[in-house]
Amino acid sequence: MTDVEMKPEDGEKKEAEGKDAKKNKEDELKDKKPPPTPVAEIKTNVTLIERAVSTLEPRFTHRVLRTLTALRKKLNNKVLRDAIEEVYANADINSTPKSALLAWLPPALPQEESTMDVDSIPAPSPPQSRQSQPELVPECEVYFRLLILHYLLVSSETYKQAMDLGHETIQRIQALNRRSMDPLSAKVWYAVERAYELGGELADARPLFLAAQRTASLRHDDETQASLINRLLRSYLHYNLYDQADKLVSKTKFPTSAGNPQFARYNYFLGRIKAVQLGYTEAHNNLQQAIRRAPAAKTAPGFYQAVHKLSVVVDLLLGEIPDRSLFRHPVLEKALSGYFEIVKAVRMGSLSQFQSTLSKHAADFEKDKTYTLIVRLRQNVIKTGIRRLSLSYSRISLRDICVKLHLDSEEDAEYIVGKAIRDGVIEGRIVHEKGWMECGGQKSGYGPEVSDVFTRRITYCLELHNESVKAMRYPLNAHRKELAAAEGARERERELAKEIQEGDLDDDGPDLGDGF
Amino acid sequence: MAPSQIVALHKELQLAFGARPCNLQKCGLLLAKLKVGLIETGLLLPLGDTSLDNLVLARDILEIGAFWSIRSKDIPSFDRYYSQLQTFYNDYSSVIPPSPREYPIRGLYLIRLLTQNRIADFHTTLESLPLAADSLTANPYIQHPVNLERWLMEGSYSKVWNAREEAPAEEYKFFVDSLMGTIRNEIASCEEVAYESLPIKDAATLLFFTNQSDLVNFAQERKWQVNLSAGTIAFRKKTEEKVEIPKRKLISSNLAIARELEQIV
């Protein structure tokens, strides 16, 4: 198990994922030497899917789907057409899945008859297709449909077509109801959402998603369920419907077996909802999880930036100052520049700087939907200011506080300081008659709560270890081979010993050498 | 009830509502009748295609209902009208022309959330407003609650106090009293921690009380010690809680860790 990555991250599937990713990388490396044509790649993928179905190992399907992003960019009419022709080569030209698939592609070459008058053919009935060609599982057909969907989403003219194909594919998936199809169907849902979004009708897709989510949860179809919950949350948040999103979260249970990318999205959405509802600690936890589970910064820079933007704001709202190194990260540096200035203003506790930064970058923040959150930082700026004052002075008059923090009146200052004391921001008290604030001594940082924190960390590490052990995967019956090999070696040894005992050593010398 | 009857009743309601002073009792009766009418014609929660005029009519009735509830100080009823209006404001916003009363009502709802200290709901509602976030402050009806919330959060209570007369609409003042109650409690809880004692006169100014007896009553409610002869209020002393080492907890957690380590090795 040397290839298992041990990162300080949790998630049950991390181990298996890591191993898979490595294997995948090896595969890719092998393929890299002669760069595979997209058609060849699709063909390999089809065989992998078949293997996944026959061995009941969803891992292979996951591996196929991981190549989807790269493959998507290489798709074109010809590639798809060729791949379908080749994969379904031994099938009858009029076989239903093939012609149905080809019908979705725009006619390219005149000699291809199969594209003729197939538009009207309805979705093929599953039993028939299985009988006519038992060697191809329906998963492959769905995979092709998924590829075609992605291809159709590239240009704006075919959105309508993509939506039709999406609907048809979904109907087909739901009619087939095969568990081996779940990972594929999750991806199909993504494509459907994209079709709706590009068509500008995201809100209309909601009833469809809700119905499908219900079906998926009844069928224990975790992959699809995870995907759909994320689709719905995204749709709600896109229209700022935080109430509905929150209700959806409280009424559904996100499947724990969902993949990391889905989990990362889910955590991000949760973080967003919680941040709006002032649950900053929860938001912070969720965003941390999202960052850990997200793909590497270079692979998915958009998500990485979005999560970090929100996370910086939530950190500030919690009264923490994010690491400076974060803002030097190559992927984040540019995207976070506005946020960096806000952080500087909050750190200095300077209200005027905060206001000017806010108005300068208002449009950016508005675009990121963080504006209202950042406006809430105002009170944090004041609190930071008061804390700085309380640390540097043992006694300070309210008028000085007022001047230093650019507050409007002494009266305000008194209330604000009072609130800060109550909220535990500073230790101290106000002497009203003399009009000053006396700052108390700092709390000592050592007590039972330290051991609490320490225990929590240890428990976390132990849990991580236990989960990693649980998540390790062993190929079925792999140890048999080793056993057989060991058995064989022992056999040979025994024979050798026998020969040494019985035979003439000098004559059999060379043979013996072989044995060793 | 026939649509023509609803229109007639609506006219009557508008007259009754617009009259100065407005006839609350009559409005209430009319509203009850109109609501039944709306349910019968399927307009209370419209589904599918309904004619534009009918939608506007239904919205208008509900809006008057919302204002009427506030004037008659019936807050739960206001909540009901508000949630019924949601359909018209959100789902039909692209179909029917915007109503001039939309933002006053939304703003009122925000203030209502503030008075109950439901800050999380306040922010969720604020986010779902169909306005760009940086133009929130441009709308006077929304700006008022937004400012109030900011001052409350900062602790600039005197600004809240001073803003009570600057309400953008008549109905906003109905919430002022309960909002002041909320503020007083906030200030009181701050004072308990921040001061050891306060002269009665200053305490009254801080809590916005004009006469001393109100203050004494309030102090008794919060169990403060009022020393009338010295003219001061003493707050409860913070009892220094003794920090005890939770031995049992420490032992059990250490044992659990040891057990886990045993399993690993």
Image (cartoon, coloured by chain):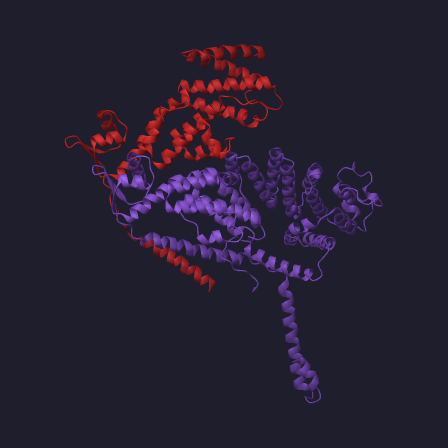
Chain colours: A purple, B red
Answer yes or no: is residue A286 visible. Answer: no
- Image position of B76 with respect to B225: above or below: above
| Residue B148, percent from left and from top | 38, 31
Answer yes or no: is residue A242 visible. Answer: yes
Picture quarter with the N terminus of chain B: top right
Q: Quadrant of residue B169?
A: top left
| Residue A250, percent from left and from top | 50, 38
| Residue B51, percent from left and from top | 61, 19
Left or right of residue A387: residue A190:
right
| Residue B48, percent from left and from top | 62, 24
Name the foreground residue: A90 vs A411.
A411
Name the foreground residue: A248 vs B186.
B186
- Image position of A227 with respect to B216: above or below: below
Left or right of residue A28: residue A383:
left
Name the foreground residue: B89 vs B36.
B89
Identify the residue at horizontal 37%, vertical 36% (top origin). Answer: B153
Q: Quadrant of residue A421?
A: top left
**Please, which residue is most extreme toward the left here?**
B229
- Image position of A66 with respect to B168: above or below: below
- Image position of A143 with respect to B57: above or below: below
